[in-house]
Image: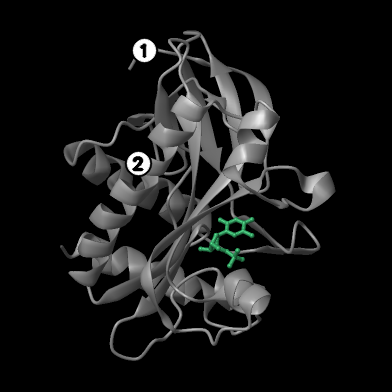
Amino acid sequence: MNISKLQQRYEGKAKKVFATSDPSYYIVEYKDDATAFNGLKHGTISGKGIINNKMSNMMFKLLEKNGVKTHFVEQLNDRETVVKAVEIVPLEIIIRNVAAGSFSKRYGVEEGRELICPTLEFSLKNDALNDPLINDSHIIALGVATEKELGEIREMAYKVNEVLKKFFAGIGVKLIDFKIEAGRLKDGSIILADEISPDTCRFWDAKTNEKLDKDRFRRDLGGVEEAYQEIFKRINNV
Ligand code: TMP
């Protein structure tokens, strides 16, 4: 693709986003930086940026094949990818199949309890407020998303869950939960944006329940790099 990288638009905790010579596209660059607890804990996960870039792109391609529209355009190199320019809807869209993390803490449910059905929750993306939970009526009342957009986001999130759950089951991995983000194109349509990686999903080995995701970093469990490599290896062996 013949576009050049221009000025940085944004630097997040794990990625940088650059404008390009074509206003319809951005370039994202994945970093090895890792944070947890809203930036309170900092570290580096060596090689993470490369794995997350490649893995996200593979997941986006799989989802596109299954009818989910995503921002993915073209991987440029190990850490950089061209994506469609979107306005991010400031929501963390979280689907859970099994209780873990903040859900377990909030409701006093043991981690690992299978939920009767997948659940969907939203947090408002706002670091200063610590990403508070937000409900549908608040989202609409605050103009974060319209009712129509919220319907599309909900449908997209459950579809992503269906496709990913099946894919990961095939490589011996339980998809416990994950976070996605939605983007708005210029024409107002909603597509899947951000990333899908061990930073943004909980993956447990189907046989041993070993954690193969960022919880190894969040909880100081050790073997962080190895967990990212293991997930990546399994995906590539399909
Ligand atoms: P939680 O149990 O801490 O709420 O996390 C739910 C899922 O969302 C889990 O797969 C990790 C992911 N997540 C992010 O991607 N970014 C975040 O900032 C947080 C808090 C969670």
Does residue 137 appear left or right of residue 237 in this picture?
Answer: right
The N terminus appears in which quarter of the rendering? top left
Question: Are there few (<14), some (14-19), or many (20+) residues within 10 Å of tag 2?
Answer: few
Q: Position of residue 166 (x, y in %)?
A: 21, 63
Question: Are there few (<14), some (14-19), or many (20+) residues within 10 Å of tag 1?
Answer: few
Does residue 178 appear left or right of residue 1 in this picture?
Answer: right
Does residue 157 appear left or right of residue 85 in this picture?
Answer: left
User: Residue furthest toward the right?
Assistant: 128
Q: Amino acid at mark 2?
A: Glu
Does residue 143 appear left or right of residue 25 in this picture?
Answer: right
Residue 155, label in figure: 2
Q: Nearer the viewer, residue 74 or 87?
A: 87
| Residue plotted at (81% across, 62% down) | 40
Q: Quadrant of residue 143?
A: top right
The C terminus appears in which quarter of the rendering? bottom left
Q: Position of residue 69 (x, y in %)?
A: 31, 31
Counting every numbered tag in the picture gives 2
Q: Nearer the viewer, residue 20 or 98?
A: 98
Cα separation between marks 2 and 1: 34 Å
| Residue plotted at (28% across, 63% down) | 165
Residue labelled with disc 1: 2
- SS at mark 1 in the image: loop
Q: Quadrant of residue 155?
A: top left
